[in-house]
Image (cartoon, rainbow, N blue to C red):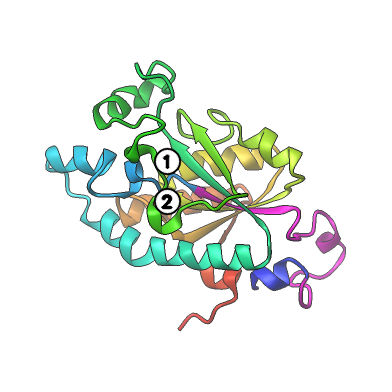
Amino acid sequence: MSIASDFGLVDDAWGGEMAKIDKPTPCNSALMIVDITNFDAHPEFGMGRITSMRKLDLTYYWERLNNKVLPATQRLLEAFRSCESRVVDVRVGAQFKDFADCHRPFRELHRKSGALRGTETFHVRKELAPRVGEAVIDKSGASAFTTGNADIILRNAGIKNLYLCGVMTNGCVLATSFSAWDLGYRVSVIEDACAARSESLHRDATRLMSAIGIDVVTTTQISGEAAE
């Protein structure tokens, strides 16, 4: 299955009557990139700086992020942009300078790392920088729907099919995918464009998502590029 066949630009990938219900098209589908920001996904900022100071070993996370997630997400961006579909970036942190608006469990980490809107720490990583005409959602907690305004933006735009990637698989990706699924979106999580602190956390999170009916797919399936 490629994004082109998914959108009906070539022969339908599903077939049958079910394919006619909210069938993915460029107009009703969106790629949502969760928290691939300097705060969450750059070793010199935010979480990376704090965990380094605390001497926590995140070798697996940084290697997966740099070697797999970033290249996969760049491929996905190219595919969705070429189809003129929607692209949504999600960022996390505070908007008030005293961090009072942050979700309580995250507040101290955001404060210590300086994850404040307008700072470099808050920005999407430059390799994936949003373009003019692409949405950016700022959230204060885990889910882009419950602590951000994702639902109103996507519904206003007529989005029914949501393709998710980002970090962390067992945290904000999981929370956002469950919220979207519960609100009635058709959700696909692109697992090789997601990362967690360990392989087991990543695997367990994707199993949870799959168990409730969220599609767990790969970049190759979605972008249509050859696996090799």
Judged from this view, the residue extending furthest toward the front is: 132
Percent x, y of residue 25? 76, 60
Q: Main secondary structure of the magenta part?
A: loop
The residue at 78%/77% (across/down) is: 11
Mark 1, residue position: 171
Give the magenta part as a residue range: 9-33
181 displayed left or right of 110? right
Dividing the picture into quadrants, the one containing residue 7 is: bottom right
Residue 102 percent coordinates (x, y) = 41, 22
Q: Residue at x 29, y 23 (%)?
A: 108
* Closest to the observer, 20 or 212: 20
Where does the image place residue 39, in percent across and percent down from the top left?
33, 41
> Can you see residue 202?
yes
User: Is 166 inside the magenta-drawn segment?
Assistant: no
Residue on which the image places disc 2: 204
- Please name the residue shown 65% across and 68% down the image: 3
- SS class, disc 1: helix
Q: Residues within 10 Å of mark 2 (few under 14, many from 20)?
A: few
